[in-house]
Amino acid sequence: MSGERESAGAVRPGRRRPARERILRAAARRFYQEGVTATGIDTITAEAGVAKMSLYNNFSSKADLVRAYLDDRHEDWLVRYRERVGPEPDPRDGVLGVFDTYIDGADAPPTGGFRGCGLLNAAAEMPAGHEGRAQVRQQKEEVERMIAEHVETLLPGRRDAARATARQIAFLLEGAMVRAGLEGDSRCLRDARAVAEQLLDQG
């Protein structure tokens, strides 16, 4: 959700990546650095090295490409999170690992610099009621559920308290990510992680 990275599945030397992948990669770079609205189809196809018809053979419209970008970005973040915490993390590490994964992205930004959460940036460009905003909301709610599951393990038999703590941590996380994007580094995320630790200690 933060910085870009090369996805898994390297292509052997001398072979080009499939057109769909090149288009999605080019769109991801441009959408993150310049914004969804400011990035036109011609810019994406030129950077991807494909004809416009190739783009429309893979995506029915720019809106379809944006949907794919949001899904791909969220899935990439989930992969990085799982790599960070492992398959069966300690619940405390599972919560703090969410912050650590965001921090990793801020500390290793793509070319052009760190601009915060690509999902929130894209949603901010969309009008109220836009399907893309609902898509991002669902993705953010998934992260909050992950946090809640770990907190419930830390607070057995205290479901309501666990859900309330998880919600506080999720709000803390997203607010810190917005501010970190404005400042262009991970300091706010690190401060937020420390506050999250205190919330977990308070139980």
Image: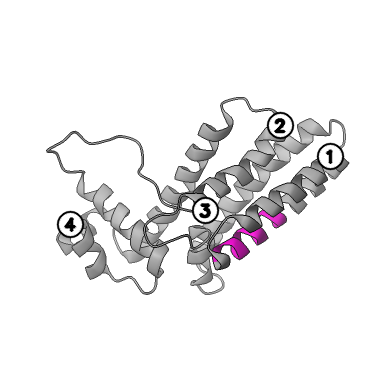
Residue 38 rendering spot, x and y as whole percentages: 36, 74
Pointer 4 local density, CA inside 10 Å: few below 14, some 14–19, many at least 20? some
Marks 4 and 2, how far apart in space? 45 Å
Is 188 covered by the magenta stretch?
Answer: no
Pointer 2 local density, CA inside 10 Å: few below 14, some 14–19, many at least 20? some
In the depicted view, which residue is nearer to us: 29 or 72? 29
Q: Which image quadrant for residue 182?
A: bottom right
Residue wearing tag 4: 54
Quadrant where the C terminus is found in the figure: top right
Give the mark, 1 or 2, whose residue is nearer the N terminus: 2
In the image, 84: left or right of 171? left
Q: Three-letter amino acid code at disc 1? A: Asp
Q: Are marks 3 and 4 in contact (CB under 8 Å)?
A: no
Relative to residue 110, is residue 79 depicted above or below? Answer: above
In the image, 136: left or right of 179? left
- Badge 1 element: helix
Pointer 1 local density, CA inside 10 Å: few below 14, some 14–19, many at least 20? few
Give the mark, 4 or 2, whose residue is nearer the N terminus: 4
What residue is at 67 percent from the left and 47 percent from the top? 144
- Badge 4 element: helix
In the image, 63: left or right of 45? right
Give the mark, 3 or 1, whose residue is nearer the N terminus: 3
Give the mark, 3 or 2, whose residue is nearer the N terminus: 2
Q: Three-letter amino acid code at disc 3? A: Ala
Residue 9 rendering spot, x and y as whole percentages: 30, 34
What residue is at 71 percent from the left and 31 percent from the top? 91
Residue wearing tag 3: 106
In the depicted view, which residue is nearer to us: 170 or 14? 14
Marks 4 and 1, how far apart in space? 53 Å
Q: Three-letter amino acid code at disc 4? A: Ser
Residue wearing tag 1: 201
